[in-house]
Image: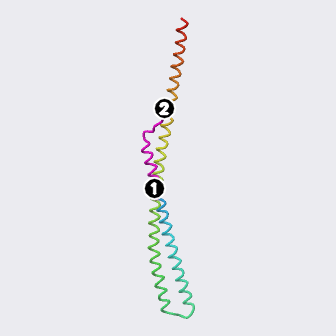
Amino acid sequence: MAKFIYRLQNVLDIKYRMETQEKTAYAQAAAKLAAEEEKFQELISRRDAYEQELRDASSGALKLKQMQQLNEAIEVMKNLIQKQYLNVKVAQKNLDAARARLNAAVQERKIHEKLKEKAFEDFKLELAAEEKKEIDELVSFNYNDANSEDD
């Protein structure tokens, strides 16, 4: 029995490895985005806490120094939030790029898998044709041998 050997198996193996690497890169980018978003939410909640403190301080006895410190803290938080927002956007773009690379790697792997399947189908057809040819030769040989004995 003939054995099927795919000529481009090395290429297919490389495509599998590339896909695995892209999956890893995508997971890392997703984790980075989640971390950046968590930092962003933490900064927002800290700013909200400072604003609440400022409201509480302004409703009671006015402590000018404390209110000034809270206002400065709120401004610092606003700046940090803006910077973190940009970090989140960069992480999102990196995630989108990783997703695109992963999709391309998956698509290339699938193409090579389809090529392998097609080559295997062709191999099976060639094998069936070879078997049919052998059977025809055997039948023809037996028929010719039987006819020569009748003579």
In the rendered image, the vertical position of residue 138 relative to residue 51, given as above or below = above
**Residues at marks 2 and 1 touching, judged by CB atoms closer than 8 Å:** no
Disc 2 crowd rating (10 Å Cα; few below 14, some 14-19, many 20+) is few
- Of the residues shown, which amino acid type is indicated by label 2? Ala
Chief SS of the magenta region: helix
Q: Which residue is found at the position 49% from the left and 46% from the top?
A: 110
Q: Which residue is found at the position 47% from the left and 83% from the top?
A: 73
Residue 141, percent from left and from top: 51, 16
Q: What range of the chain is rendered magenta?
A: 1-25
- Image mark for residue 2: 2
In the rendered image, the vertical position of residue 51 relative to residue 31, given as above or below = below
Q: Earlier in the sequence, mark 2 or mark 1?
A: 2
Q: Find disc 1 in the rendering and name its residue.
A: 22
- Of the residues shown, which amino acid type is indicated by label 1? Glu
In the rendered image, the vertical position of residue 25 relative to residue 84, given as above or below = above
Disc 1 crowd rating (10 Å Cα; few below 14, some 14-19, many 20+) is many
Residue 8, percent from left and from top: 43, 41
Q: Looking at the rendering, which quadrant does residue 83 occupy?
A: bottom left
The one nearer the camera, 116 or 84, is 116
Whether residue 16 appears in magenta in the rendering, the answer is yes
In the rendered image, the vertical position of residue 39 relative to residue 95, given as above or below = below
